Amino acid sequence: RLDTSFTPLFEREGGCVNAVVEAGSGAIYAGGEFTMIGGLAQRYLARFDNTLTVDATFRPVLDGQVYAILPQADGRVVIGGSFGMVNGVSCNRIARLNSDGSLDESFAPVFDGNEIRALAAQSDGKILVAGSFWRVDGVARAYIARLTADGSLDDTFVPAQFNNSVLALAVQSDGKVLVGGWFSSAAGGNRLTRLN
């Protein structure tokens, strides 16, 4: 049954919400293609507090859509999408924000490609990144890559070759990674495969 107590009004003709994630603090993040929420100008990313109202103190400025959101235990949040700028600073499709919405400029991987569609955390703090890209920090990585906790490319993770976009990631309890997307060949996988 619909919970009528939760009624955020996202505004933008033809817009959408691509990702919704609850952080451990109880905050809820929503990312997508929108320009206002309930009369508050807010583009592409918003945070709701634990009373389910828009957190007006969290006001990052992005220039493109958010497709993936990964809250971290320390209150920061990693976002991925089609954006190229965050708070006036160049960010190639991925960024990490501090809890106040400011940009964590120490986290600055460079992705060459169109967009990041999925993010997932591993138990060791490393971050899996997937989408439509072909290079990370100048190194060839097509559609999926792994970053260390500081945002640099983990060059020990060289996944199976994918031939098209990866749209979804899930880390299983045994550490294996489920991968879904448009691909038709990834070590025998078709649309859905699993990596060690």
Image: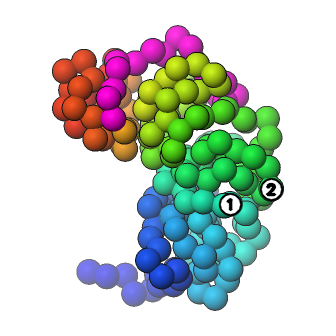
Q: Earlier in the sequence, mark 1 or mark 2?
A: 1
Q: Residues within 10 Å of mark 2 (few under 14, many from 20)?
A: few
Residue shown at the point (45%, 39%) measured from the top left = 132
- Residue to which mark 1 is pinned: 62
Which disc, if any, is residue 105? none
**Mark 1 vs mark 2, CA separation in Å:** 8 Å
Which of the two residues, 129 or 71, is positioned nearer the viewer here? 129
Name the quadrant of the N terminus.
bottom left
Q: Does the residue at mark 1 contact the one at mark 2 (Cβ under 8 Å)?
A: no
- Residue to which mark 2 is pinned: 88
Residue shown at the point (73%, 67%) measured from the top left = 59
Q: Where is residue 158 in the image (x, y as percent from the top left)?
A: 45, 15
Q: Position of residue 108 (x, y in %)?
A: 72, 35
Would you identify the image quadrant in which residue 183 lies? top left
Query: Which amino acid type is shown beneath numbered disc 2?
Result: Gly
Q: Position of residue 36 (x, y in %)?
A: 61, 80
Query: Which amino acid type is shown beneath numbered disc 1?
Result: Leu
